Image (cartoon, grey):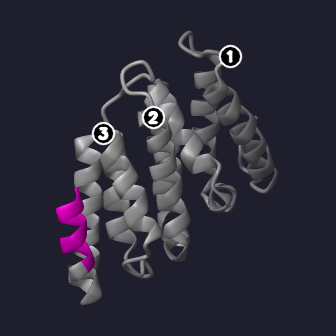
Amino acid sequence: IKEARKELEEEAEKSGDNAVRAVVNFLCACLRCSTTPHLKAFKDVLQDNLVKWKGHDKEVCEVLDKFQFLEEKSDDDERWYNSAVADAAGQLVESTKPCHKKIRSDVVKLVVFALNKGSETYLHLAKGITWEHGFKDMLEKVPGKELQTAMDAFLSWLKSTTLDPEGTTCIAVANRLSGQLSESAKNIENIEK
């Protein structure tokens, strides 16, 4: 990871599309590896602000898509893995603010995917995204059908037999997302009740 980071930093100094591509490739590789150190490196690279994301919404969506292929682990399998998933997802949303307008549908779809999966790993993913300040704004501005899909996924998840109502991650996601969905629904007239 250290060698790849050094090469990445050297490439990013050149700036331009090649730098963005190098960062995207690095981030996608970290997600493919699905280990705690790789997810921490993912977050660190984003925090380093090696590239400017404005105008690179397609590249951000490419990274968002890779979250769907994370290895699912419990905290018993690897202690800090799920927290690292949440941190990585949250940092991606935070770091790509210039793209929020163009990626909001993809971010909401990823949360829906995570709720439908319902595993510990994917609930951490949903937590990482929904706890970022920009997510509420994204949710309020998606088309009504997408908001309805998010609401349906949320309600299905709440009714699922795998839900642990006493789990801290479940509580965090449920509390945050219920408020965000209800606020967003107030702003869209065509949501079916």
From the viewer's perspective, tell me whether residue 95 is left or right of residue 55. Answer: right
Task: Report whether 145 appears left or right of 2.
Answer: right
Tell us which disc is closer to us: 1 or 2: 2
Q: Residue 152, percent across and down?
A: 61, 32
Q: Earlier in the sequence, mark 3 or mark 1?
A: 3
Is residue 38 located in the magenta-colored stretch of the structure? no
Amino acid type, mark 2: Trp
Of residue 142 and residue 44, the one placed in the foreground of this image is: 44
Q: Secondary structure at mark 1?
A: loop
User: What numbered label is drawn on residue 122?
Assistant: none
Identify which residue is drawn at 68% across, 59% down.
133
Quickly name the residue at label 3. Answer: 35
Q: Which residue does the image show at 37% across and 66% down from the upper left?
A: 45
Q: Which residues are magenta?
A: 1-9
Q: Hey, what amino acid is under mark 1?
A: Pro
Q: Earlier in the sequence, mark 1 or mark 2?
A: 2
As drawn, the residue found furthest toward the top would be 161
Local secondary structure at mark 3? loop
129 or 41: nearer the eye?
41
Q: Quick one: label 1, few (<14), some, or many (20+) residues within 10 Å? A: few
Mark number for residue 165?
1
Residue 182 at least partly seen = yes
* Principal secondary structure, stretch drawn in magenta: helix
Give amino acid for label 3.
Thr
